[in-house]
Each structure stands twice: as C-alpha cells, then as structure tokens.
Image (cartoon, rainbow, N blue to C red):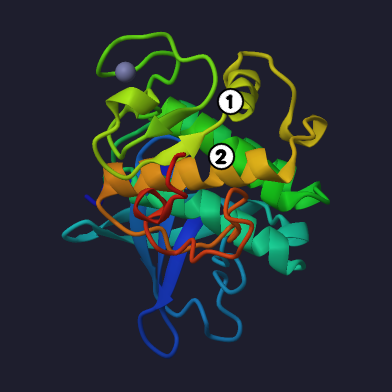
Amino acid sequence: MVDIRKAEGVVIRRRLFSDTSLIATFFTDRFGKVRVIAKGALRRGSPLRGKLDLFMRNSILFYHGRGDLHIVKECDTIGSYGGIRDDLDRIVAASYIAEIVDGLTLPEAPDGSLYALLVQSLAALNASDRPVQVAACFAPRLLSVLGIFPRYSSCAECGERLEGERFYDGASFRCKGCLSRPAAAVSGGTAALIDRILSPGGPGPDALSPPAEQLSELVALSSAIFEAESGRRMKTRLMAWCPAAGRAVDEGRNPVQNACKPG
Ligand SMILES: [Zn+2]
C-alpha cells in the first residue's frame, strides 16, 4: 500500500531532470521542505504542466520515491502569484525570500509558522511596487521565526546596552570597543527599523518608508546572518550598494567580510 501524503506548498526551487521531467523543491505547510520529481510535467497535455513554476502555491498529493525524493501524483494550483513572474524586481525579491527558506531549513522538518510567513511574503510581493523593500523587511521576520536572528540590543561580549551604532561580526552583535574582526555596521536607525519590523502586529513592509541606507544595512545584515548560519554564500543580490562608502559593492561576497570598516 503506497503511503500518499497531501500538503499545501510553495515551489521554492526547481530544476530540469530530463527533457520532460523536473525536480521541484516545495516548502509545505505540513512536512516542511519536500523535494519531488514531476514526471512528464513538461509534456504537452500533462496535468502537471505549468503548475510547478517558481513561487506557485499548490495543493499536492505525493508519495515516497527514492531517498528524500518524492513523486508527485496530483497538483492543484491555489495561488499563482503571476504578478511576481511578470516583473524582474519582484522575481529577484521572491528569489531572495525563497533562498533564505531553502538555505536555512532541513528536509521534512515541519514549520507551520515559517510556511505562513512565506505565503504572506509572496502575497505582499505579488502586489507591491517596492519589492526590494518588502523582501528586505520580511527577511528579519523569517530569520526570527527560524530562531536565528541574533539579539541586537546588547553587546554579546561586555553586555553593554547598545544604543546607536552596533556591529554584527558573523556570530553576534558587539559594541565598537569589543570588535575583534570585520563586522557589518548597523546604525541606531536601522536597529529601530528592525524593532518595528519584528514587533507583533507591527506595520506591513509597504507601510514603512525607511531611507535607502537603512534598507541597505538591513539587507547586508540579513545576508550575513544567512551566510553565517547556512555556511553558504547568498546567491540572490537584492541590493548592491554600500551607503557608508557611497559606492557599489559586490553584495554577492560575504557582507561581513565586505562591510564598510567602522570609524
Ligand atoms: Zn561590548
């Protein structure tokens, strides 16, 4: 008897498996991250055709295949988020969100709160004129739900309360006096922005209007946390601008290594 599972999920990654089949990574409500093979999905007339594009939200029936790879039996689209795929900035923003979820979760570890936040972020991106801002503001929430957003109100070394500028060194926040290696600077204004983003029932990302410098710091910080926790480089370049230096920086490099030096 084949054990058929049912879940709702969003496609966060996909790749071709053959001329007609593909492998899709879903993040689902009930099973967390699930990899499925969709045989014949690219064939004309396949009932799976067009349903496994990136960021699509589907109800899926699947059963166990080999290893951690499952086989899709049925797939019904619940939300297509066509507004995302029509706009390059939104695609990049959604890719950033998807990369965070994919890079920081283990296969088949259920996390209903993370799923709800993922769906909420894609719905917000689908209609937003400020997709970079929306993604930048959802990132700390995702990292917080994952339990890896570091404490930023006091220095991890001396314990001093952090008021203005503070520094994330790839492990924790420190005051300037306790810095011993390159770190990403986070201004007091950006810390206040993070307070608002993380406060329960706080304003939606579209309702905030942070200055570009704060947004840039926020993206650099989220990327640095992602890289420290996942051990992978962030591939999606949401923003590539360093306000302190006033020049373009390669945000694809580790933002902690690449940060503007304090002082
Ligand atoms: Zn300190």
Mark before the other along the chain sequence, 1 or 2: 1
**Which residue lies under the disc numbered 1?**
194
Q: Is residue 59 visible?
A: no
Q: Position of residue 217 (x, y in %)?
A: 56, 42
Q: Amino acid at mark 2?
A: Leu
Horizontal side of 160 relative to 78 (left or right) equals: left
Q: Does residue 162 lie above or below 170 as drawn?
A: above
Q: Is residue 163 visible?
A: yes
**Which residue lies under the disc numbered 2?**
218
* Residue 55 picture quarter: bottom right
- Image mark count: 2
Question: Residue at 60% across / 82% down in the picture?
Answer: 45
Mark 1 closeness class: few <14, some 14–19, many ≥20 residues within 10 Å = some
What is the secondary structure assignment of the residue under circle 1? helix
What is the secondary structure assignment of the residue under circle 2? helix
Cα–Cα gap, marks 1 and 2: 8 Å
Q: Position of residue 157 (x, y in %)?
A: 25, 18
Question: Residue at 57% across / 55% down in the picture?
Answer: 245
Q: Position of residue 194 (x, y in %)?
A: 58, 25
Q: Position of residue 71 (x, y in %)?
A: 33, 62
The circle drawn on residue 14 is none
Horizontal side of 127 relative to 183 (left or right) equals: right
The answer to which of 208 and 77 lies nearer the viewer is 208
**In what quadrant does ligand 1 lie?**
top left
The answer to which of 263 and 27 lies nearer the viewer is 263
Question: Residue at 46% across / 39% down in the picture?
Answer: 263
Q: Amino acid at mark 1?
A: Ile
Question: Residue at 42% across / 46% down in the picture?
Answer: 261
- Report if the CB atoms under discs 1 and 2 are less than 8 Å apart: yes
